[in-house]
Each structure stands twice: as C-alpha cells, then as structure tokens.
Image (cartoon, helix red, strand yellow):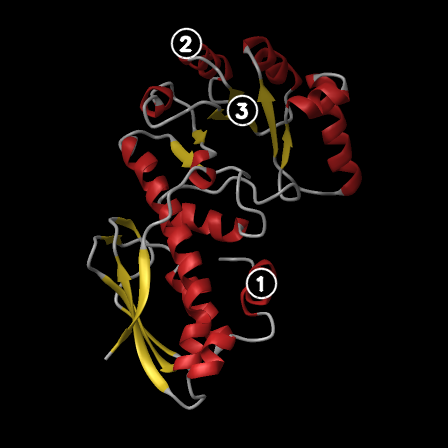
Amino acid sequence: MINKDLFDAFLETALQEDLGDGDHSSLACIPAEARGKAKLHLKDEGIIAGLEITSLIFRRIDPELKIEFHLRDGDRIKSGDTGFTVSGTVQSILKSERIVLNVLQRMSGIATQTDRYVQKIKDLRTKIMDTRKTTPGMRILDKEAVRIGGGENHRMGLYDMIMLKDNHIDFAGGITQAIRKTNEYLDRTGKALRIEVEARGLEDVREIIRAGHIHRIMLDNFSLEDTRRAVALIAGRYETESSGKITLDNLREYAACGVDYISVGALTHQIQSLDFSLKASD
C-alpha cells in the first residue's frame, strides 16, 4: 500500500509544477462545459504499472471524471493495446494528461525493467530487490513499480531500516564498533529496526559473523568465487544480499551462488520509459 502522506505531497508538487495558476491553453479555447472522452494508447511491449495511481490523479483533479480500465497493473502489454478510457469535462482531461502520462510511462518502464531481471532467475530462490537510487520525490512510485514488476522493495529510506555501509563503518571505527554502537542505540531508543551490514571482503564477513546481532549481510562488489565462499561462511545464520556491478548478463551466475537477495540500482535509475499517448476519442 502506497504511503498516503508521501503520495499527497508528490501530487501537490506535481500539480503546482505543471498547472501553476491554470491551464491557459485549455482555458483559452475549450468551453468549461465541454465534455469529451480520451483513450490511453499503448505503443510499446512490456509491463504496465501505475493504473491505480492514475485513478488517484484523475480523482484529485476532478472527482467527476469517469475512468474505465481495460487492463490491470502488472498486465503484459503490446503495441496497439488500450489502457483505459476517461470521460468528463475536456478541461479536466487535458489538465490531467501530462501528469498521468509521466507517471504511467516511467512506472511502466521500471516494471518492465524489473520483470526482465525477475524472469532471468525465476526458477531460482534468489529475489530481485530495488535500492534508494530513485528519482527524488518519486520514490514511492518507483518502488511501487518495482513491486508490480515482480521485484521486492528494500528499505524506503533512512528511517525504516539500519544499513551500515562503508562510510558508517569507517567513521564509527570499524565493523565491530559500528554494530555494537548500533545495538546500543536501538536499546536506548526502543526502536525495532532490522540491521544490515555491508562487507567489502571475506574478512569483513568473518568479523560481522563474530560480532553478530544483525539480520542481513550485504556482499558488495564480491566476485562470484568470493560470493560462494561468503554464502558458505554465513551458512544461513543471516540473510545475504549481493550488490554492485550485477547486470542482466551476470545476474544468473550470482543468484546461483545461493544469496537470498540481489539488489539492483538499475531497476530505477537506468530505465527507458514506455511510450503511451492519451488521445481524444469518439
């Protein structure tokens, strides 16, 4: 379920950015009482995502708009398909057009990219996961698109999970110190947050295991051989996550090492939006 407060903040910013003091193009030539219909035309193959979000946007701009969906989030699409039909006042339809398309095209691009990774290892136990490499202000949409594409969500932000990365470890004085201080902090504040620790090599993995009191170990930029060794060392005591320089070409090899998760920043920051258009219809 999308965080309502974050979505409302996103939509308020998007509307202000696009509408300002009014859609003067429509106000200038379209009568306020004019009514019409438009269809979403799909021009690419992939996975569609963002239809439920589209409904929220339309309702925010004009609760009287009527939307008839012909597809559902997560459906596979091809060029020539119709996503939905929207009807109501023409000014409202035109006011909604660009925001709706921007959201749908980007989310569908992310869902399609995610699906490529998921399908590559669908017969293995490893799960594909996103990262925080998202568009500022659109993280809730980016992560929802990953979920629709079959992936899983990593932490939403800095507040819902503790992740001790290289800089945290170096500034804290080392792995053991960082883990100890983190557990003291959680005891002191009463926060029930999961702890993930980044390992930069096999010695780091050994130290993390000795320190304990964590939930997941990230194997950052490990070779395939070292990933296999690390998984054997951890032996199921903690969750494992591979990250760094993992592409569609080597994804399956890393998954075959037995890690629980593979996190891929490219799911949300190296994507190609799908091509859709919203056109007037009889």
Is residue 60 positioned above or below 51 on the image?
below
Q: Position of residue 183 (x, y in %)?
A: 72, 30
Q: Position of residue 186 (x, y in %)?
A: 73, 36
> Which of the 4 quarters of the picture holds residue 49?
bottom left
Instruction: Give the crowd class for mark 1: few <14, some 14-19, many >=20 residues within 10 Å.
Output: few
The amino acid type, in three-letter code, at marker 3 is Met
Q: Which residue is mark 2?
A: 225
Mark 2 → mark 1, Cα distance in angstroms: 49 Å
Residue 192 appears left or right of 142: right
Q: Residue at x 47, y 68 (%)?
A: 57
Residue at figure coordinates x 34%, y 30% from the top left: 125
Q: Quadrant of residue 264?
A: top left
Above-or-below relation of 83 to 265: below
Q: CA distance from mark 2 to mark 3?
A: 15 Å
Q: Which quadrant, please, contains the C terminus?
A: bottom left
**Position of 274 compared to 240: left or right?**
left
Q: Amino acid at mark 2?
A: Glu
Q: Nearer the viewer, residue 26 or 90?
A: 26
**What residue is shown at x 62% (from left), y 39% (from top)?**
161
* Residue corresponding to mark 3: 218
The quarter of the displayed image where residue 90 is located = bottom left
Secondary structure beneath dot 1 equals: helix
Residue to which mark 1 is pinned? 17
Q: Residue furthest right?
A: 188
How far apart marks 3 and 1 lie (CA) works out to: 38 Å
Structural crowding at the residue carrying mark 2, measured as other residues with C-alpha within 10 Å and reported as few (<14), some (14–19) or many (≥20): few
Q: Is residue 63 visible?
A: no
